[in-house]
Image (tube, rainbow, N blue to C red):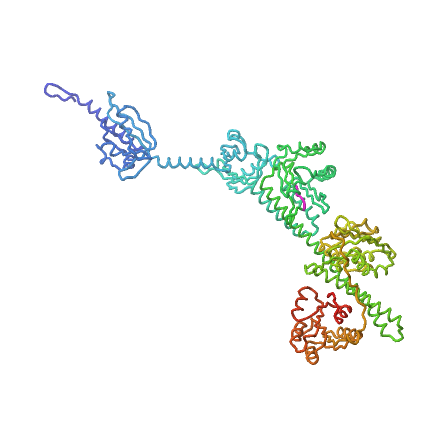
Amino acid sequence: LPICFIGSCIDITGRKKVEEELREQREWLKVTLSSIGDAVIVTDIEGRVRFLNPVAQSLTGWTQAQAEGQPLDSVFNIVEETTHAPVESPVAQALREGRIIGMTNHTLLIARDGAERTIDDSAAPIQDESGRIAGVVLVFRDVTEQRKSEATRRRLAAIVESSDDAIIGTALDGTIVSWNHGAERLYGYAAAEVIGKSIEFLTPPDRPGEISAVLARVRQGEEIEHYVADRRRSDGSIVNVSVNVSAIRDDQGRIVGTSAIVRDVTQMMRTEQSTRFLADASATLARLVDYESTLQKVAHMAVPFFADWCMIDMLQPDGSLRRLSAAHVDPARVQLAEEMHRRFPPDPEAPRGVWNILGTGESEINTDIPASGALERIPHPELRRILETQGLTSYMGVPLTARGKVLGVLTFITAESGRRYDAHDLAVAEDLAHRAAVAIENAQLYQARQESDRRKDEFLAMLAHELRNPLAPIRNALQILKMPGVDDAMAGEAREMAERQVHHLTRLVDDLLDVSRIMRGKIELRRERVELATIIARAVETARPVIDAERHKLVISVPESPVWLSADLVRLAQVVANLLTNAAKYTKSGGNIWLSAKRESGEVTIAVRDSGIGIAPELLPQIFEMFMQVAPADSRSQGGLGIGLTLVRNLVEMHGGRVEARSDGLDHGSEFIVRIPALAEESAQPTTVDQGTDLQPAGPSMKKHVLVVDDNADAASSLAMLLRLLGHQVKVTNSGPEALQAVAAEPPDLVLLDIGMPGMDGYEVARRLRALPGTDRTLLVALTGWGQIQDRQRSKAAGFDHHLTKPVEPAQLQAILTHRPMSEA
């Protein structure tokens, strides 16, 4: 109904209706703004807050009642995310520019309680019916978790891209959907080349369906961990990988794809395989007895795991090279390699290869044979052509070195496998070569020890044989002398027989002692100016009984003019006598022996040649070794201890000379040549050599009172008997105390005192004896089996005047008893 006032009437019905509609619209807008998920703030044209929906109240910390009428900057306090610098609100921009201001980034909302939240915001102007700006509506949301998720995704993406491992995503059917840089590095394919393809193309041709089987297991919910497989690179080479495959699930937990983390384990597997290979090889080498067959086993162990080809070449004693083994999985190729080695042996002058390694002791490696042009440099066209057909890829050669000596060379070559050697492989090869060389050396030492033990056993058997041989005729001679009816001729023959055999026994013992002294460095030469002919005469005199016993013909050739040496007459004569005796023993009865001596080029050359059994070629390098026998071990007809030539070599070398053996083989005789430095002066007078003194009974004025002291009753009695036959008065005691009592009762002219007596030894007896009165004119002579310099010095310190080694030569005793100069032994 219209309402009438003075002068006018107003119809209020339409206005109320409009107001009602506006109220409903505001209520509807308020409800709508309150129910949406974003925060909403409405301001008037002056930027004062008119309305906050519940989300805005929650984020800002302001209620509607608190915020209404407040400046927006008080309620909506925003700063820059990183620097916390104040930021202009989008409401001010919308009021100023009259347009919608889009969402900004890196903005922090600081709530009334100080809490900070990352937000995205935007503002739009509110226009009235006439189009004028009446206010602004501000919409913003909390994006803190979203930002965190995005940061996490970015970090994960960065990790994936920077990972050394290949990380590959696939659909359930195996289609590649993601491919990181690690995958590009591992397989050699760019992401653009593979995304959209089936991952099966990475499987080697000999393993079809392998990846499909893995995907099927993942679709069943199975996790695949550390799955080791072979995969193919873009260049066709094979890489060993370890794969972990996990399922990718959507929000409902359904499996929608796979993620595979792939790691290159080629080097790790090679290291493990190398370790196993070296362990297996070491176990084989540890059982090494015959090193040749064992090394052949090692070569075959290296194929095909470590090499497609493995060759072993060993340096021989004569300096030649011997191919010990050539290994390959194909026997036909091995046969071809052996044929090529025979036809085209390694060139000793080549700058690389087996001979160069033997000479330098340094390893060689050629990682890429085709790229290096090594085959093009081979001088033999046919050999080069054959090698080119083998597809050789890589090469290593390492020395077998023990104690600084190169024994041989191990060669490894790859071909059909396509493997290229690197520094790790070279280290493995050198490790193997070192272990093999040590094993070879140990085997050689073991074999040498066995050989030495065998020779020692043979030596002991021969020693027993050689000692029994002279003992038998000595015993027979003594038995003959005791029998009745023996005439003077028979007795004389028996005595001569016993004397010869005693001399032989003495020589055996002397040889043994001399070798022992030389080996211990305890022998000394008594050099003097001596004429060559004197040495030859002394040697021939010593060896003549053996030569004559075998009815050999001895031809001697010496210079007519004197030739002088600075030498130990006894020792050098011993050398020549040993050579003559050997020649006699190893020559059949009635044979020929030639002894020649001459001066040439400042040296004296002495040669002993025979027509005997000769020396086998393989024995010539060992002929001067200890216990070496020219004749078979079971042949005892020749006799000897196998030490004579060892003694010869050592005595010659002590004189600054050398000795060599020659023979054209068995049954062709042998020759030994000694070379000794000669003296420049040839005008000196020859040295007089004492050839010994015949034993004669002492005259009345020369008879002596002698005391013999020895715990060996037979030794003491026999020596006393000899001295009594020479006309001397002799008393015998068998111990030190008895000797001291005898001397104290009546000091003798001469005491022959054994050193090695039990209880009180000879040194102690001598010291006490010298303290007794009346012994200042008594000659004190030591009898002992020890004749070294230190033994003589000890005897002198104890008070002895002379030192004689057993068995004592009667001529030495006669010289002492008659006060003539003598040579002590």
Which residue reaches farthest top? 7
Stretch of the chain drawn in magenta: 407-411
- For image coordinates 12% across by 19% down, the residue present is 8
Q: Which of these two is toward me, 273 or 322?
A: 322
Q: Residue 179 versus residue 574: which sits nearer the camera? A: 574
Q: Nearer the viewer, residue 406 or 506?
A: 506
- Work out which quarter of the rendered image holds the C terminus and state it: bottom right
As drawn, is 244 to the left or to the right of 96? right
Q: Main secondary structure of the magenta part?
A: strand
Picture quadrant of residue 43: top left
Q: Position of residue 603 (x, y in %)?
A: 75, 50
The front one of 822 and 250 is: 822
Q: Quadrant of residue 216?
A: top right
Name the residue rendered at 68%, 43% in the picture: 312
Q: Quadrant of residue 733?
A: bottom right
Q: Position of residue 89 (x, y in %)?
A: 28, 30
Report the residue that reaches farthest toward the bottom: 745
Left/right placement of residue 693 relative to residue 124 reads right
Above or below residue 104? Residue 781 is below
Q: Is residue 625 visible?
A: no
Decide: is 673 above or below 325.
Answer: below
Residue 778 pos. (x, y %): 70, 74
Q: What is the residue that sits farthest to the left in this orientation?
A: 6
Q: Is residue 408 highlighted in magenta?
A: yes
285, above or below 729, in the image: above
How many numbered tags mark residues here? Answer: 0
Q: Does residue 155 belong to the magenta stretch?
A: no
Q: Is residue 647 left or right of residue 227?
A: right
Q: For the point 82% across and 70% down, which residue is it?
A: 475
Give left or right: position of 618 versus 37. Answer: right
